[in-house]
Structure formats: C-alpha cells, structure tokens
C-alpha cells in the first residue's frame, strides 16, 4: 500500500510516495490493513485490538520467512519440473536466510538520546531548533544549492546547466555515404 502525492501537490519536481504498513501477499491481507486504518480513523486507538508484541531478539524464522513467502503461491500452481527446480535451488535460499539471520543478530534497536526522548514533556527543556549555521560550511553550501526544493522557497533557483551531447554530429557526406552502403529491406525487388 502506498500514498502518492503528484508533483503539483507535493510542491517538488517529482511525485512523493509513502509506503504504509507491511507488504501484503493477498487481497485479504490488504483489506485487513485498510480495516485497521478505518477503525483507527473512526474510533481512535481504543477501537483497535491490542497489538501483538514480540521480543527484539532476531528469531531464525524472521529471517527465513521472507526468503520463502513469495514462493508458496508459485509453488502450488507450477508444474512438476518447476517444483523440482525450486527444491534444487532451495539450499541457496537457506544460505541467504542464514546470512540474513546473522545480519539481524548484529543489529540492535535504535535508541534516541535522552534529551530527544524527554523533549516537550512537562518540566523538561525544549531543544533549540537546528539552523543552517549548525552545519559545516560544505553542507551549508549544498543546502543552499537545493533551496529551491524547500517549502519556504528562500533565495533563487540555481541556473541549470545546458545538456549537451558528447557525440560529434555526422556531416552530410558521412550520412549520404552510409545510406548508399546499407541496403534498405523495403526496396527489394522480390517483395511487393
């Protein structure tokens, strides 16, 4: 599922995409996702069932499930030869899944600094807003070059460089010589 804003609404030179929720495997999962959103919009968080929480430990099936979930439907409707081929390449999926599981075990849950977690709470200080002067000079220059993409639109859009071809244009003599050397298929005598 995704939300799309055309360039005219986004205020940028390109459309904006935001992917919502997890990837769905069938229409029933997509309907369930929209029902969840509808209940949240109509009834608020109180109308939703309690979420199923899991630990942050990377269990092996979390790594192996994505490797095989796309093949289940394909495996059911395919021919016997294709099924044998899928079984023969399944060790490759196991190797990829093992690598994915090892990479998950090397990750950790991100944690915001305490000043950000407590920002805006009663009695806690509000951190100052970041300004352009907080960045190094090289980053400041790059931000100024992209200022035309900002919502506030300060300054002037930088001049665009004219695109030029790196090819050398053919001369009239080269063009006429090439046309004479290559026979044209439509002017053959044995075809109408």
Image: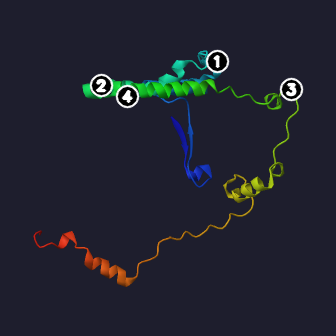
The residue lying at 39 percent from left, 25 percent from top is: 90
Q: Nearer the viewer, residue 60 or 155?
A: 60
Q: Identify the residue under disc 1.
A: 46
| Image x and y of residue 67, in percent | 46, 27
The answer for how far apart the CA atoms under marks 4 and 1 are is 47 Å
Q: Earlier in the sequence, mark 4 or mark 1?
A: 1
Numbered disc 2: secondary structure: helix
Q: Is residue 18 above or below residue 181?
A: above
Which image quadrant is residue 101 in? top right
| Image x and y of residue 113, in percent | 79, 30
Numbered disc 4: secondary structure: helix
Q: Identify the residue under disc 4.
A: 89
The residue lying at 85 percent from left, 41 percent from top is: 128
Q: Nearer the viewer, residue 131 or 68?
A: 68
The answer for how far apart the CA atoms under marks 2 and 4 are is 9 Å
| Image x and y of residue 104, in percent | 60, 26
Asked if marks 1 and 3 touch (Cβ < 8 Å), the reply is no
Q: Earlier in the sequence, mark 3 or mark 2?
A: 2
The residue lying at 76 percent from left, 55 percent from top is: 138
Q: Nearer the viewer, residue 84 or 120?
A: 84
Say the numbered circle drawn on residue 84: 2
């Amino acid at each position: 599922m995704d939300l799309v804003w055309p360039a005219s609404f986004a205020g940028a030179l390109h459309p904006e995409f935001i992917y919502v929720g997890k990837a769905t495997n069938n229409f029933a999962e997509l309907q369930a996702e929209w029902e969840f959103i509808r209940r949240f919009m109509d009834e608020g968080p109180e109308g939703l069932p309690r979420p199923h929480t899991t630990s942050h430990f990377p269990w092996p099936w979390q790594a192996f499930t994505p490797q095989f979930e796309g093949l289940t439907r394909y495996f059911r409707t395919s021919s016997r030869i294709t099924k044998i081929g899928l079984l023969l390449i399944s060790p490759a999926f196991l190797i990829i899944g093992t690598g994915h599981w090892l990479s998950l075990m090397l990750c950790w849950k991100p944690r915001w600094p305490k000043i950000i977690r407590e920002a805006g709470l009663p009695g806690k200080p509000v951190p100052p807003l970041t300004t352009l002067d907080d960045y190094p000079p090289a980053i400041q220059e790059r931000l100024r070059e992209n200022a035309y993409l900002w919502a506030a639109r300060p300054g002037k859009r930088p001049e665009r460089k004219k695109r030029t071809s790196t090819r050398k244009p053919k001369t009239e003599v080269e063009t006429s010589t090439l046309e004479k050397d290559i026979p044209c298929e439509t002017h053959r005598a044995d075809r109408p």
